[in-house]
Amino acid sequence: MPVIHRSIRVGWELRVFFTENVFDPANPALKDALADEMPRRVLVVLEDSLAQARPDLEDQIQKYFSVHGGKLILARPPLFVPGGEAAKNSITIVTDILSHIDRHHIDRQSYVIAVGGGALLDVAGFAAATAHRGVRLVRVPTTTLAQADSGVGVKNSINAFGKKNFVGTFAPPHAIINDFNLLATLRPREKRAGYVEAVKVACIHDAAFFDEIEQGAPLLVAFEPAAMKRVIYRSAELHVQHIATGGDPFETGSARPLDFGHWAAHKLEQMSSFNVPHGEAVAIGIALDSIYSRLAGLLDPSSCARILATLERLGFRLFAPELLNSDREGRLHILAGLDEFREHLGGRLTVTLLKGIGAGVEVHEMDAKNIVAAIGELQAR
C-alpha cells in the first residue's frame, strides 16, 4: 500500500528572564520579551488573591502599558481570575478566559500574559493554547513553586474525572519572566513550597546542588533573599535543561524523571481534597520514594537520611494521615497512584527512584510491601 512519509521537526526556544519589578515602566524586560515591529494586543490574566495582596498592582500594570502603548496595547484592564488548585477543577474559568480572548480580539499574533501561581498559569495557559489553536503566552509566576518548576515548563492543564492534570496541552510559552519581588506577599508556607522542587531536581540530576541546599537550609528557612534567588534560579535552570535535552519534552514515552516523588504526591493531593498542597505532598512523595529506594537496595542509608533530614530542616512534614487510608480489603488507597501514573503515560509503569544523590534511575515495578514499610517509617518519624 502506498505511504507518504515525511518527518516534521518543530523548533522551540524556551526563554526564562529573571528580573525585579517587571511592571515598572523603566524595566525593559517585558517589552523586550514581547515587542516586535508591529503593535500587539495583550490580555493580562491576574490571580485575584495576588491583586488583593498587592492593591497597587492593577494600576501599575495599566500604567506600564500606557507608557509602552506604541508597541503594546492593553486590550482591557487586567482580568481577575481565581487561583489555587480549586481553579483547575472546573472548565468554567477556562471558558471565561476564552470568552475574553474572543471579545477583545486576541489573535495568534497577540499575547496572553498570565500573572499568578502555578494553578493560574495552568488554567490561563490551557485557554491560550486552545484559542485559535495557539495564542502566544507569557508566564509571570508569582510563587516559589512556579518560579522554580511548574512555571518554566511546557504543560498546561486542568483536573477532570477526579484526576490531576487529566485535560491539557503541551505548548511552550513565548517567554517566562521570574520577578523575585512578586514573592514578597507570600506566607511562609507558600514561600517554602518551591524548595521541594529544587530538592527533587537536585536529587535526580545534581549532587552539588543538593549539597548547596543542604548547607544553606538555615538561610532558606529564614527566607534570606540571596539564598532564595540562587535556589530558584538553579532549580529553574535544571528543569529547563532537562526539558530541552532530556529527549522527550512532550512526554510521548513512558518516563517522567522530573516527576520523581510525584506518583504518590498527586494521589495524596486528591485523597486530601487538596488540603495537602502540592509542595507538601511532593515532599512526602520524595521522602517515600527515597526510603523505598533504600529498601530496594538502590540508595545507601546515609544518602537517604540526608534527603529526609534536609526536607525536614526546610520545614516540611513527611507524613500525612491520608497515607493510611485503605479500602475494605485493607489495600492502601495511595497505591492506586501507581496505576494512575502508568495510565497517564500509557504502556508499562515507569517510576524514577534514586541510586544516589544526583543519580536517578528508572524502574518498572514497585513492591507494595516496601511501599507500606516506607509509609510506616514516615509515620514513625
Image (cartoon, rainbow, N blue to C red):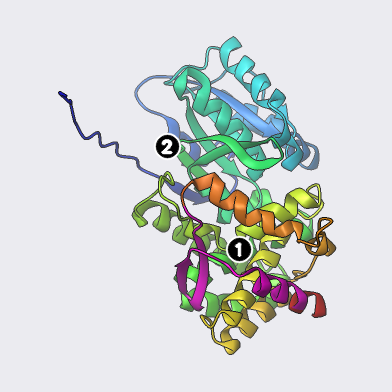
Cα–Cα gap, marks 2 and 1: 37 Å
Above or below, 75 against 20 in this view is above
Residue drawn at x 25%, y 37% is: 9
Q: Which of label 2 and label 1 is nearer to you?
A: 1
The quarter of the picture where the C terminus appears is bottom right
Above or below, 13 against 180 in this view is above
Is residue 329 visible in the rendered structure shown here? Answer: yes
Outermost residue, left direction? 2
Percent x, y of residue 14: 40, 45
Q: Secondary structure at mark 1?
A: loop
Q: Which residue is mark 1?
A: 261
Magenta region: 348-376
Q: Which residue is mark 2?
A: 32
Residue 218's quadrant in the figure? bottom right
- Closer to the camera, 74 or 25? 74
Residue drawn at x 61%, y 70% is: 367
Residue drawn at x 44%, y 39% is: 172
Percent x, y of residue 129: 50, 28
Mark with earlier residue (2, 1): 2
Q: Amino acid at mark 2?
A: Asp
